[in-house]
Amino acid sequence: MTDRTALIRPVPDSFPLALVRHGRPDIDLGLARAQHREYRRVLEETAHVVHVVPTDEAHPDCVFIEDTAVIVGTVAIIARIGAESRRGETPPVAEYLSRRFDIVEMRPPGTLDGGDVFLLDDVFYVGRSSRTNDDGIGQLRAIAHHQGFPVVTVDVEDALHLKSAVLPIDDETVVVTPRSVDESKLEGLRVLYEHDDERNRFSALPLDERTVLVTADAPVTAASVAAMGHAIVPLDVSEIQAADGGLTCMSIMLR
Ligand code: CIR
């Protein structure tokens, strides 16, 4: 059976102070925690071993653990997160990953957020964004090439991260928010589009070969994923979305 471990980090009391791109939304802390518990329950129900990294009150965004590290073959790259206030999130994640991977800490001036990286059909796609710079991409590329993986850089034009706008569903399919990234770099992939009425609401996390966790507030886009034969599991993560998060950002998947 496939080894599926998911690292998660609970919602801290300070979560309502999380970074946001626009304004300061009201975040219901109790609801955020309930939604996070549901996320954990779905992972456990789909045969993931969930490892919980203790939360950190000094880092309101620490629930977005995805941004702290990228697994590239046998190496765990510890990110130098683009937002300076988040850089202290990485040590406990690195400590856990060091039990299973060779650790490479990203060096300045490189910056990279895990939310800008996905692996699809053995190719790494990396977003050049307001959080991930060319030097960070270069460091990731060197390690990926050494491990035998090609790297494609995608300019993120109107989104926080690559995975805010391009969501991998399976080995050949992504769901894209129109007019958000340089789509020419996605050539060769099957592209489904987020419905315009649901702009920036759809997020997805493949749970196994067949099942995809999707945000509950983008049902039309989710239906297009279901039409391809995937079983979809909708989850309400309104409070996570209020802090610019989605479904991938709350875990690091070790598979
Ligand atoms: C931030 O601005 O860094 C957080 N409030 C949201 C990060 C979401 N991360 C992700 O999608 N990978």
Image (cartoon, helix red, strand yellow):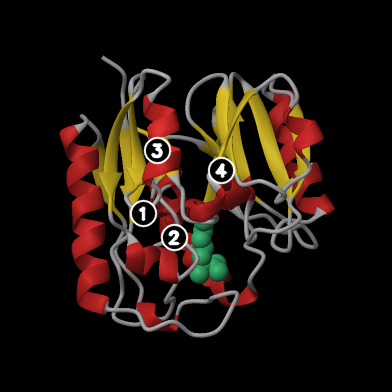
Which residue is tagged 2?
64
Q: Nearer the viewer, residue 248 or 62?
A: 248
Q: Could you give the CA–CA distance between mark 4 and mark 2, rounded to whole angstroms?
A: 13 Å
**Amino acid carrying mark 2 in the image:** Phe
Which residue is tagged 3?
222
Give the label, 1 or 4, closer to the camera.
1
Whether 214 is drawn above or below 37: the answer is: above
Residue 53 picture location, percent across and down: 31, 57
Q: Residue at x 30, y 68 (%)?
A: 11
| The N terminus, quarter of image | top left
**Between discs 3 and 1, the one toward the N terminus:** 1
**Amino acid carrying mark 1 in the image:** Asp
Residue 81 picture location, percent across and down: 62, 62
Q: Secondary structure at mark 2?
A: loop
Q: Could you give the CA–CA distance between mark 1 and mark 4, rounded to whole angstroms?
A: 28 Å
Give the label, 4 or 2, closer to the camera.
2
Which residue is tagged 4?
70
Tag of residue 132: none
Which residue is tagged 1?
217
Q: Is mark 2 within 8 Å of ligand 1?
A: yes
**Between discs 1 and 2, the one toward the N terminus:** 2
